[in-house]
Image (tube, coloured by chain):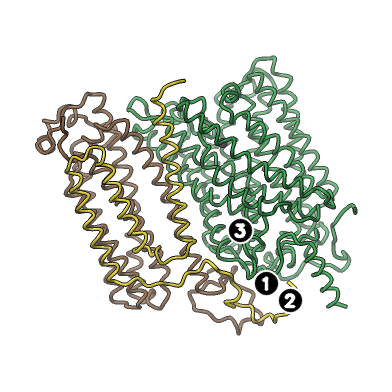
Amino acid sequence: MSDSTAIAHGTAEAHHEHPPYQRHHFETIAQQNDATNFAMWLFLLTEIMFFGGLFTAYLIYRNWYYPAFVQGSHQLQIGWGTANTAVLITSSFTMAMGVWSAEMRKKGALVLCLVLTFTLGLVFLGIKTIEYSEKIEKHHVPGFHYSVQSFVDPASDPEVYNEYHDKPLALDMARHTELYFFLYFAMTGMHALHMIIGIAILGFMIFRARAGAYTTGHVTFVENFGLYWHFVDIVWIFLFPLLYLINRHPLAH
Amino acid sequence: MSDTIVTLPDQSTARIPKMNYLTKENGLLSWLLTGDHKRIAILYLISISFFFFVGGSLAGLIRLELLTPQSDLMATDTYNKVFSMHGIIMVFFFLVPSVPATIGNFIIPMMIGAKDLALPKVNLLSWYLYVAAGILALYTMASGGVDTGWTFTTPLSTHYVNTHVLTTGMAVFIAGFSSIFTGLNFIVTIHKMRAPGMTWFRLPLFVWAHYAASILMVLGTPVLAIAIVLMALERTVGIGVFDPTKGGDPLLFQHLFWFYSHPAVYIMILPGMGVISEVISTFSRKRVFGYTAVAFSSVAIAVFGFFVWAHHMFIMGISNYAVLIFSLLTMLVAVPSAIKIFNWAFTLYKGSITFETPMLYAFGFMGLFTIGGMTGVFLGASGTDIHLTETYFIVAHFHFVMVGGMLMAFLSGIHFWWPKMTGRMYPEKISQLAAVVTFIGFNLTFFPQFILGTLGMPRRYASYPPEFQILNVFSTAGASVLGVGYLLPVLYLTWSLKYGEIAGNNPWQATGLEWQVQSPPLTENFPEIPIVDHEAYDYEWLERQKEKEVASVG
Amino acid sequence: MAHDIPHEQHFHDPANVTNPEHAEHHIVLPLEYSFVFGTLLLCTALTVFAATRDLGVFNPIVALAIACFKGVIVILFFMHVKYQSNLIKMTVGAGFFTFLVLITMTLSDYISRAWGLW
Ligand SMILES: [Cu+2]
């Protein structure tokens, strides 16, 4: 807190006692906690709306180009996707346990939980990197090098073909897989960006937690970060079925 | 009925209080690192005034070019850049932050009896984001500008133009986050920082209006952000999402853009309406008629505001059924705006009206906003919209709302709270003159444009058929008058910083909590947190307070 | 403000704040977190399984229903909303409401475009 917002104390100095983490313009610590918690929720609302634009785009193009979206999604490995979902859910659980440890003032447990969350976050990004590099190899990254080979001639891509026996798409429809992959990269990329930011903050928090910063009864920071982390988890909970599970049983026709 | 309600302290003995938020600390750093909402408001006031005059100069260039039918002052593509930058700067760097970031920032914590906004650092961050965005916008302008119009219309912005779309987009993106943080801060503050006894229905309507506008900032602006990100990606890597050749739909950009930019109109106008509520009540010495209705009409405007955006897209090829629905919903949003206008009119009825400058501007607002709003009905109705859209009728319509409405409200508010911000009065006579000049200049500038639009003069062209010249000359002449009207306040308000009369705590005899403390206020606003035991606009309470004071002094 | 309570008592006095929206801090227990965690993993397995069956139009509906359920329990328990004030509950609701407005109103155009002209 910069001094300029501090109060001109005058004679009130003697009556001016509060925990060091209470900002001067709040009357009680409960007021401060409520305010920051509420602010965090409002920030998450902006995040919902930010992703909302992408979800809208997704829904429109999925309706328009359903076959392209189905075959595009077959290029994603359901194993990696499921594993990553599990990793992220687990990290959400460890984060929630971290909040509990902070509330119970268990420093060791808090540090452990934060380190686990941090590690699981990295594992998620690691798996994402594997998936991305696979797309790069197959020229499925939208842009100048995009290739529709796997969709106009599915048999040329035996790994996927043996599992789903996709019919070749007309060139016109096949080209719309590029939109699918754009949305895939935009949505998972935006999600990964949030993960990276979260992991960076987690790293910072681990240091602070080891110094005992969050186990003195003031848990708002851990709690609010937890909200952010869970929100990122929720985004993935929706991305997973929308991107990976569009239609996983072999097409009936 | 007296001529004025202004009561100033005895000028021979009155002094500006030695301890106040301005004198608390000195030096540039004490300003640049401040967390004080009042200082941040002043920083914002200086920056947005600067951008107002940048945008205003561009408007001057536009009017000068349109003085003659040929494009002779500048090349046609230069003209495109000038009107685009005029729109971008005026919308994102002046209108959106205008009242909230300056007057709102300064007054809201004081109105609700708080020491500061809930998140002072976020408040400062918001200003820095604004400045960063502003510098980026200026850099863009210096290095060639952008010519897409302020709407960044796809596929023009993504496929056809070779100007600085990306940097301008980035500037708007950053400015958007500045606005999000302001709105977020207001919502938290209004919920969590109210003084004891300050219930929701005791809040001044200014606070209600800002609350509603803040909701729009928090929920709408992120959609603009994602629209700009997608547009930038489309332009750089060709992602296809707005590209018909790849199966994308350029209209999707319009949907996302207007999902924000229609509510943005209310982000701009709602805080202005809040100013008008305060001013009308103070200068007619009456509680605002139908307080609850006015309060809820702000919220209703905010909610309805999210359901009407496609009225900007009637001729773009959206489905006829969507046109029908959005047209209908657009008519509905007129209702809460009308509630406000009628309630202000009823507030005036049998009030003890005085005509100080803020009140003159407020009258200007009521008249011009009504015209602006009513012409909006023509545009909301899809049939007339097909004829009128993309003509000067649109230009006149939104300038009546934004300039005639919002700018009048902004000036009204600046004059109204100037004594509180600086401790000194502005000179009354010349400012009344400025208000009248502004009103005349405004009408001369923009009323002819309604006629031009109805006659079919399209917007966004540097040249026009010669038969339209006479009305354009009127318009340009009006713009010059308007320019004088806007320059005057800068001069005499600056003058008043040193030579203005000492205002005292409450020159207007207004009821808001901010008027019950010294001007300029202390850094922590209140020497002691007030306990609120009266409704908003309770002038009898004010009288009783004064009697008590006299009794205790005597 | 002219009232006669002495100056000193006003600094950081809990009585100086009206906060009807305050909810007491509730500590969610590890057991509750563990149940939620288990449910989330089960739901993940379920949604993958459901995707491999041919349910016709119900495939996306089932997938989204499961995702919504997962999202809701994360919000209620991991994010403590179940134990939060009504203000927070309404805030979350408002967020999803606006999100749905964006999606449904936009789609209302896209869906009805194919219906053709009058
Ligand atoms: Cu609109």
- Which residue is the extreme one toward the bottom? A14
Q: Which residue is mark 1?
A: B531
On screen, B170 above or below A174? below
Chain assigned green: B
Q: Nearer the viewer, residue C26 or B53?
A: C26
Q: Which residue is mark 2?
A: C3
Q: Chain of mark 2?
A: C
- Let me know if residue B100 appears in the view: yes
Q: Chain of mark 1?
A: B
For ligand 1, the image quadrant comes to top right
Classed neighbour count for the residue bearing mark 2: other residues with Cα under 10 Å, few (<14), some (14–19), many (≥20): few
Kindly report the distance in space between the C-alpha atoms of the residues bearing marks 2 and 3. 30 Å
Locate residue B170, reporting x and y percent.
46, 42
Chain assigned brown: A
Q: Secondary structure at mark 1?
A: loop
Q: Are marks 2 and 3 in contact (CB under 8 Å)?
A: no
Identity, as a three-letter code, of the amino acid under mark 3: Ile
Q: Nearer the viewer, residue B528 or B421?
A: B528
Q: Nearer the viewer, residue C98 or A218?
A: C98
Q: Are marks 2 and 1 in contact (CB under 8 Å)?
A: yes
Q: Which residue is mark 3?
A: B40
Kindly report the distance in space between the C-alpha atoms of the residues bearing marks 3 and 1. 26 Å
Locate residue C1, reporting x and y percent.
73, 71
